Image (cartoon, coloured by chain):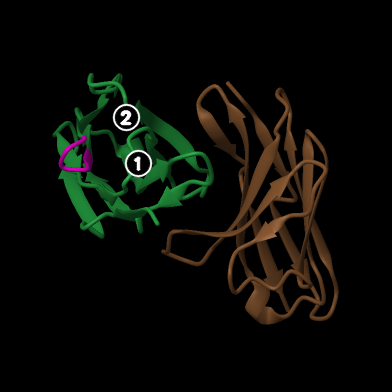
Amino acid sequence: AQTVTQSQPEMSVQEAETVTLSCTYDTSENNYYLFWYKQPPSRQMILVIRQEAYKQQNATENRFSVNFQKAAKSFSLKISDSQLGDTAMYFCAFMRNTPLVFGKGTRLSVIA
Amino acid sequence: GAVVSQHPSWVICKSGTSVKIECRSLDFQATTMFWYRQFPKQSLMLMATSNEGSKATYEQGVEKDKFLINHASLTLSTLTVTSAHPEDSSFYICSAGPDNYGYTFGSGTRLTVV
């Protein structure tokens, strides 16, 4: 069974700085998808970024980018120019067919 | 993008009564819907997988007679918490898909059983 590990329960970053959230996963599959979801205090799950395993190029979405290392089974999220609105829980997730497998989450606090 | 509507957003019910939560895909057809439960400061715990027109598949430890799931159409799945008790109080979230990006989440339902 696939597992997703987020080793940082909590992190904090100064506004405008850069922060990286770690995620590792375990699978024997070759084709799969990886996601980062954000859950702000409203508890709405918001898709931040998605990566297809067959693509070597790292996905980027504005201030959010990933470092996908397939051989190492690592999928970290980098947030540049952190904003107060980035304060939230961040979940890393794996998907091969269905359903999503989530990590335990990292609580990120952006400090003014 | 894809939109999933979940209703109600919060509900308070008396112990022993039943509560129905709806999950609707508004602009796409969802062949599969998932129901999750989330305890405070924890990750999402998958309760069941619902496929349109067939019986739901429940995760180990989830009581299928307590958490009734119906997926009668490609746009609607419902979760009914039967004979609710205070320990059923939690945050319930659905997701639907697949769409172009994977699976889209509803906004969640906060259930409080008193």
Pinpoint the chain carrying mark 2: A
State the residue position of label 2.
A53
Q: Colour of chain B?
A: brown
For mark 1, give the secondary structure: loop
Q: Is residue B44 above or below residue B12?
A: above
State the residue position of label 1.
A29
- Given the image, on which type of amino acid does mark 1 rest? Glu
* Mark toward the start of the polypeptide (2 vs 1): 1
User: Horizontal and vertical percent for residue A37?
Assistant: 41, 40
Q: Colour of chain A?
A: green
Is A85 displayed left or right of B67 in the figure? left
Q: Is residue A61 above or below residue B102?
A: above
- Given the image, on which type of amino acid does mark 2 rest? Ala
10 Å crowding of disc 1: few (<14), some (14-19), many (20+): few
Quadrant in which the N terminus of chain A is drawn: bottom left
User: Horizontal and vertical percent for residue B21?
Assistant: 77, 54
Q: Which mark is residue B78?
A: none
Give residue A84's quadrant in the image: top left
* Residue sitting at x 80%, y 48%: B54
- Dominant SS in magenta: loop
User: Horizontal and vertical percent for residue B82?
Assistant: 81, 71
